[in-house]
Amino acid sequence: MATLAVRPLAPLDVPMLHRVMQQCERLDMLGDAPVVPDLANRVLAVLLTRAVRDRIFVALVDGELCALLAVRTQERRFRWDVIAVAAGSPRLDANERVCVELWTAMLEYAIRGAGESGAKRLFASCHDDSPARESLRNVGFDAYSQYAVLNGCVEASLIALPAGMRPQEDSDVWSIHQLYHQTTPRAVQFAEALTSTAWELPTRLPWLRGGLQRPSTTAFVLETLDGIEGYCRIDQTSRRAVATLLVSDGCRDRAAGLVNASALHAGIRRNMALDIVIPGYMGDLVTRLEDLGFSVRDERIALVRHTTVPALVQTRLVHAHAESTERVPKGVPSYFQ
């Protein structure tokens, strides 16, 4: 009988990783990005930097490396994000059944590790009919929303900011969080469990150790007499730019302009592709963005898995009190029993 073992990535595993890429699936929000180059970059980051948030786990069958799982930890938010899975080896045919079995075992290992580290939730996304979907279902991931990823290029003709639009300030965090509550269903809020810190701009550190560039984030808000009614965050890496959008019901007609202006003032070039993540409960924005020239390139399911975090319970030994005989004169009525 074959023996399956799961453990963290070791430096000696690196030369064998290229054999594991027979079947690959991305499980993060931008699921169509190339898996192999991205995994190679993550492995390099894990080996070269100490402060990296990525973790790589591998599975071995009878000592042969045959599967890989990549996650990203967010300690401040007590969550892990499942980034990608891969399977295959020279002696193993990574068919759907094999992938489900290997990925299920690796996800169970990651869930235990997340709980032991203090994380309360793991997040992933996938297509409904994929082997990864079955693996996630096997370990208790629950779907809480659907979303579409649109892709296109911004219009370069815009120069001035639209009326009421300005860069995000530190004092806007609470108002943006209230906008999130107004525009997001309660079930999604419970699954994502976001706090106001989710809208804080990250500290700008231009370089990580090892020469790896840190992604940059720029955010803008749309302010009216009723307060902040729109929010757009642009996250950029060396390969792509992603926009995240929140818009109140009364400002849906200004969503396309908000995205376009945010991208331009964030430094997105005209020939650089921009991805926009639109959850299913804001699906009416898809048509408005398609009018701007964007098109839907992917539709995925968002899933969450809650963990059980170990708790230290301190008990006290309670000694039974010794019964004392009531001392009263003989013959006097007493309530003592």
Image: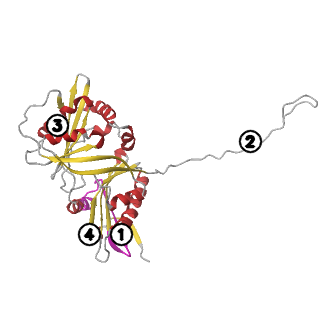
Quadrant showing the C terminus: top right
Q: What residue type is labelled 3?
A: Ala
Label 1: element kind? helix
Q: Which amino acid does label 1 sit on?
A: Val
Disc 3: which residue: 256
Q: Residue furthest top?
A: 225
Q: How much space separates mark 2 and mark 1, taking CA atoms?
A: 62 Å
The first of marks 3 and 1 along the sequence is 1
- Residue 55 in the magenta stretch? The answer is yes
The numbered disc on residue 22 is 4
Q: Does residue 155 lie above or below 42 as drawn?
A: above
Residue 167 in view of the camera: no
Label 2: element kind? loop
Disc 1: which residue: 98
The first of marks 3 and 2 along the sequence is 3
Across the whole image, how many numbered discs are drawn on residues?
4
Report the span colored magenta. 42-66
Label 4: element kind? loop
The first of marks 3 and 4 along the sequence is 4
Q: Which amino acid does label 4 sit on?
A: Gln
The numbered disc on residue 16 is none
Give the left or right position of residue 157, taking residue 230 as reference.
left
Is the residue marked by circle 2 packed among few (<14), some (14-19), or many (20+) residues within 10 Å? few
Q: How much space separates mark 3 and mark 2, taking CA atoms?
A: 74 Å
Q: Does residue 186 lie above or below 109 as drawn?
A: above
Q: How much space separates mark 3 and mark 4, taking CA atoms?
A: 40 Å
The first of marks 2 and 4 along the sequence is 4
Label 3: element kind? helix
Disc 2: which residue: 321
The first of marks 2 and 1 along the sequence is 1
